[in-house]
C-alpha cells in the first residue's frame, strides 16, 4: 500500500509514518518539512491542493494546534489550516479513503463529560479556535465519508505540546492546577498511530481513541514531569479563581480552555473503536521513556 501522511514532520504524523513503514507501506510524507522517512511532497496546508498522485490511502494529521488568543493571527491560522486546508485535502483525495485525525476538543464542554460517546454534541460551546476549527473541519470530513479519530491529550516521547506547557507553569517546584483531582482520558501517540493504520478498514464515522483506562490527574502530572527530570509538588487553585484569572489574564498562558481541560472529568468511551478489533496496546508506563 502507498500511504500519504499529511503533517508527517509533526509529533503525530511522524509516528504514523514510521508505523506505516514498519508494516511495509510505501509512505508519502506531505508537509512543509520532510517526514522521518519516505518521499517528501511539499504542501502548505494554508494554500493549494496537495499532490496525492499514486496514494491508495490518506491519513490527515496536519493541523494548527494550540490555544490562540481571540482575534489573533494564530486564530485565523487555525481556520485556514483546519477548515480550509481540510476542504482542499478532501478535493484532492478524490474518492480515496481518508483517515482524518480530529480531537476530543470538538466536544461541547457544557454537558457532562464523565463518559463521552461519539454522539456527544460538537456543534457549539467551544472555548477556543482550536475546538471550533477542528469541529468544522471534521464536519467536512464526515460529510465526505472519512473515518474521523478523536484522541484526547496525545502524549509520548518528544511531545512538543503537553509537557512543555506543564513545565512553563512550574514555579519553585510547585505546579498549581485548577480544582481538586479529576479523572482524565489520555492518548499515547503510539495508540493513535495504531488506530490510524487500522482505521482504513473501518466504516466511515467518528471514533474516540484513548488509552485503555483513564488516569487520575495529579499523580499522572507528577509522573510525566518526573519522566522529564522534574520533581514537583501539586497545589490546587479553586476553579472559580482559576476561571477568573483566565478571563482577566492574571496568569499568563492560563486560559478558559486550559482550565476546562484540567479541572473537569473527561473520559472517552472507546467502545466503538474496540468493536472494530482495535485495542490500545500502550499506556503511561510503556509509552514514555522513563529514566
Image (cartoon, rainbow, N blue to C red):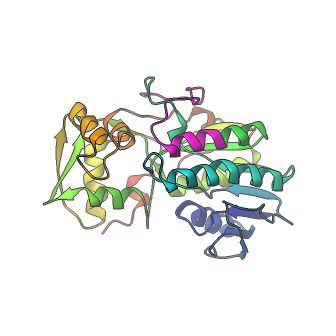
Image check: 10 left or right of 181?
right
User: Residue 62: where, in percent of width, then height?
Assistant: 62, 58
Count all numbered tags in the image, as a single digit. 0
Residue 213 lies left or right of residue 220; in this view the side is right
Write the start and end of the magenta stretch as one range. Answer: 114-137
Residue, x 63% and y 63% (percent of image)?
7
Q: Is residue 130 magenta?
A: yes
Residue at x-position 86% and y-position 49%: 95
User: Which quadrant holds the C terminus?
Assistant: bottom left
Residue at 55% in and 44% down: 103
Question: Which image quarter: residue 145?
Answer: top right
Asked where in the image residue 43 lies, by quadrant, the reply is: bottom right
Residue 147: give x, y in percent of width and height.
Answer: 71, 43
Query: In the rendering, at what x and y percent does residue 49 appear?
Result: 78, 60
Residue 92 higher or lower than 278, as above or below: below
Check the image and name the residue furthest to the front. 71
Q: Quadrant of the N terminus?
A: bottom right
Q: Picture coordinates of residue 71 (x, y %)?
A: 48, 47
Is residue 27 rendered magenta in the image? Answer: no
Q: Nearer the viewer, residue 90 or 156?
A: 90
7 shown above or below 68:
below
Amino acid at each position: 500500500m502507498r500511504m500519504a501522511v499529511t503533517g508527517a514532520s509533526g509529533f503525530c504524523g511522524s509516528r504514523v509514518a514510521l508505523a506505516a513503514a514498519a508494516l511495509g507501506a510505501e509512505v508519502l510524507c506531505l508537509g512543509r518539512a520532510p517526514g522521518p522517512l519516505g518521499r517528501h511532497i511539499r504542501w502548505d496546508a494554508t494554500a493549494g491542493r496537495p499532490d496525492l498522485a499514486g496514494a491508495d490511502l490518506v491519513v490527515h494529521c496536519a493541523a494548527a494546534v494550540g490555544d490562540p488568543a481571540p482575534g489573533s493571527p494564530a486564530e485565523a491560522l487555525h481556520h485556514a489550516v483546519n477548515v480550509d486546508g481540510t476542504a482542499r485535502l478532501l478535493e484532492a483525495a478524490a474518492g480515496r479513503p481518508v483517515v482524518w485525525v480530529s480531537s476530543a476538543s470538538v466536544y461541547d464542554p457544557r454537558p457532562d463529560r464523565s463518559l463521552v460517546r461519539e454522539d456527544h454534541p460538537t456543534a457549539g460551546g467551544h472555548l477556543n479556535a482550536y475546538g471550533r476549527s477542528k469541529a468544522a473541519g471534521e464536519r467536512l470530513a464526515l460529510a465526505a465519508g472519512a473515518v474521523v479519530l478523536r484522541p484526547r491529550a496525545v502524549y509520548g516521547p518528544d511531545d512538543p505540546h503537553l509537557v512543555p506547557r506543564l513545565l512553563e507553569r512550574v514555579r519553585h517546584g510547585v505546579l498549581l492546577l485548577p480544582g481538586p483531582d479529576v479523572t482524565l482520558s489520555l492518548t499515547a501517540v503510539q495508540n493513535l498511530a495504531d488506530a490510524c493504520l487500522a482505521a482504513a478498514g473501518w466504516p466511515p464515522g467518528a471514533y474516540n481513541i484513548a488509552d485503555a483506562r483513564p488516569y487520575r490527574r495529579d499523580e499522572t502530572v507528577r509522573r510525566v514531569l518526573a519522566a522529564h527530570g522534574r520533581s514537583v509538588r501539586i497545589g490546587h487553585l479553586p476553579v472559580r479563581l482559576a476561571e477568573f484569572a483566565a478571563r482577566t489574564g492574571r496568569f499568563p498562558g492560563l486560559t478558559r480552555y486550559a482550565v476546562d481541560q484540567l479541572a473537569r472529568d473527561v473520559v472517552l468511551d472507546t467502545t466503538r473503536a474496540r468493536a472494530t478489533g482495535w485495542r490500545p496496546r500502550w499506556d503511561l508506563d510503556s509509552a514514555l521513556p522513563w529514566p
